[in-house]
Image: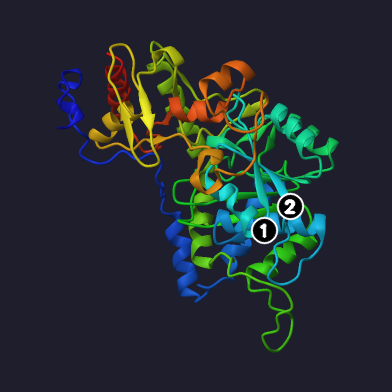
Amino acid sequence: MSILDDPRFAGIKPFESKVWLSSPTMHGDEQKWVDEAIATNWVSTVGANINEIERQVAEYIGINHAVALSSGTAALHLAIKLAGERLYGQPKVGHGTLEGRKVFCSDMTFDATVNPVAYEGGEAVFIDTERDTWNMDPVALERAFELYPEVKLIVVAHLYGTPGKVDELRAVADAHGALIVEDAAESLGATYKGAQTGTFGDISIISFNGNKIITGSAGGMLLTNDGEEANKCRKWSTQSREDAPWYQHEELGYNYRMSNIVAGVVRGQLPYLDEHIAQKKVIYERYKDGLADLPVTMNPLGEDCEPNYWLSCLLIDEDAMASQVRGEQDVLYTTEPGKSTPTEILNAISAINAEGRPIWKPMHIQPIYRMNPFVTRTGNGRARSNAYIAESGFEDVGANIFHRGLCMPSDNKMTSEQQDVIISIIHRCFE
């Protein structure tokens, strides 16, 4: 039985073509640069497209050096490796730069943000989320330094295109002599106090994955103001080959360089970044207006910043949540008049041939990282019972947002008519 058989959804018909969460938007210029790469036979990991997008991105963001890599994850790995070497020196072959050391990491994010810490032998300590931007909580970060004063590296992500509390996070980091690796994969084009994300970390990264604000189908970049570190990153990304007539290797390397084909797609996308951001903002505002009469709020935008509005998200009010229980891969929920759940809304959206997603499941409740330390502003560890929560004042903000939130279809090719249907579907879930 389809959820659309429920009388609440009478008259609703699925879209003929799928409305995606966030899909690539091609303009035609991409083909020109890809064709040129093929015609000139520059299809590997060197070529004019790579050189040009490194120059253009560095100029747009306001950073000295941009290094084109095969993915945002590759960029994060090399950024964390660079930070580890800057802090602790070059390790022996087979050992990570963070071997046995703790690293403070954003909790509510995609696991690509934190996995490179494990690649380099470190242990992620997850820092809870604040409600104003859904990013790392500076108060919880300060508390984490009280518990683990030896930590010297912080990995911060900007969630769904909205910058975190950059000044407060930087002040905490500086007070404790810690470096910041900034994961701006989701926030390309977003600004904080007029400066682009990607400029706030000691080393930063962006992503051109297929669902991002602009895409190369894949790819990412490492961003730095240090020319020596940029060159080191380029060397690592091409298997650390030395300048010798033969293949000479004196340190560990990786196959992480971006191809000139992927760079051609990115080159064709870059002129449309600001246009994509404007389109995403219209989508966000239309959702905000269309859902204003429901017991929900939109993902917060924070102060002193202009997001890129990559994804529009919804958070159901506490007292408007029907019962919902999630296991590791399954979920059960009830329907109640005047209430709903993220699962019910996502099922209804899916039934009309549109794509939504749950909010990122926080890292501290992921099976792979469940035993890692987790720090909130009100407690250390995980709330094991309602009695503990009541007695200690423990508040797990990220888990609460995950429980009540969802990402709505945010594709910039979605028509206003299609978005109106999605808004209507969400209203009917609360009937």
- Circle number at residue 101: 2
As helix, strand or loop, the secondary structure at mark 1 comes to: loop
Query: Relative to residue 135, is residue 215 depicted above or below?
Result: below
Q: How many marks?
A: 2
Tell me if I can see residue 415 in this picture.
no
- In the image, 2: left or right of 219? left
Depth order, front residue of 26/94: 94
Q: Residue at x 42, y 12 (%)?
A: 319
As helix, strand or loop, the secondary structure at mark 2 comes to: loop
Residue of label 1: 121
Q: Residue at x 70, y 46 (%)?
A: 103
Tell me if I can see residue 312 in this picture.
yes
- Image marks 2 and 1: residues in contact by CB distance under 8 Å: yes
Query: Relative to residue 268, is residue 201 depicted above or below?
Result: above
Ranked by sequence position, the earlier of labels 2 and 1 is 2
Query: Relative to residue 316, is residue 187 depicted above or below?
Result: below
